[in-house]
Amino acid sequence: MTEKRLQAKENVRNYQEVKAKDGAEVPTEDDTLAREPLPRTEQGWDDLISHRIEEAIRNGAFDNLRGKGKPLQLNINPFVPDDQQMANSLLQNNNLAPQWITDRTAILAAIETFRAKFQERAHGWQAAWRTVGQTAAEERIRQEMREEWSKQLATWQQEVSELNKRINNVNLQQPIARLEIFKVILDEELTRVGMSRSLSN
């Protein structure tokens, strides 16, 4: 507070004491503030706000605040929209995760499970195909294996389609675009394990 303001406050107190001795009704400081014209500039508003805060501090308005003297709990997640902050804090306080995180975790686990089974099954097919000779007598076995392989590809394609539906649903729920989960593509999965749609390769 500036020296001028302190001097002005002292003058007001002296004036109030003199008037009180004479028996006249003296307006309180709050009455005086209430009759003050409202500021017209930003600086004026800043001064008025600062003045009111200083008065409140002197009057003890902030003495019994909850958590006084303790560190602030600044655990607001900047990635959560403002309208979801309360729901997010409730979930966090109860050791729960938002639904989209639970769904995302589940679909990522499902993709890993599919890939592990896929790799094991594909390598089994590779090993079985290599055991069949190239003689004319074994052509019937090779043909049967090709037919079974086509059925296996169709089964995998169905599994991939189901996974991709779930991936789409999860991607639509996620609040951040960069968290998008890429769809599973059967040809890419075959390439990953060193195979193609043709069993003979």
Image (cartoon, rainbow, N blue to C red):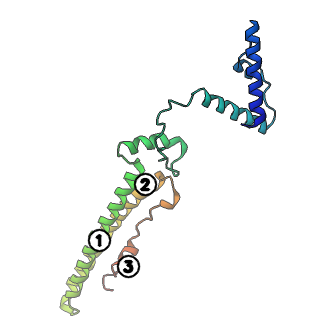
What SS does tag 1 mark? Answer: helix
Q: Residue furthest left?
A: 137
Q: Residue furthest top?
A: 23
Query: Which residue is nearer to you in this view: 65 or 138?
Result: 65
**99 left or right of 51?**
left
Does residue 114 lie above or below 96 as drawn?
below
Label 1, residues with CA under 10 Å away: few <14, some 14-19, many ≥20: some
Q: Which mark is residue 118?
A: 1
- Is any atom of residue 12 visible in this view? yes
Residue 103, x across and y down, in percent: 38, 53
- Is any atom of residue 25 visible in this view? no
Inter-mark Cα distance, 1 to 3: 12 Å
Q: Is disc 2 in contact with disc 3, using a CB cutoff of under 8 Å?
A: no
* Type of amino acid at the residue the image marks with label 2: Val
Q: Quadrant for residue 49, please give it.
A: top right
Residue 8, x across and y down, in percent: 78, 28
Return the disc, 1 or 2, that comes first in the chain's sequence. Answer: 1
Q: Nearer the viewer, mark 1 or mark 2?
A: 2
Q: Which residue is mark 2?
A: 170
Residue 184, x across and y down, in percent: 40, 67
Q: Nearer the viewer, mark 2 or mark 3?
A: 2
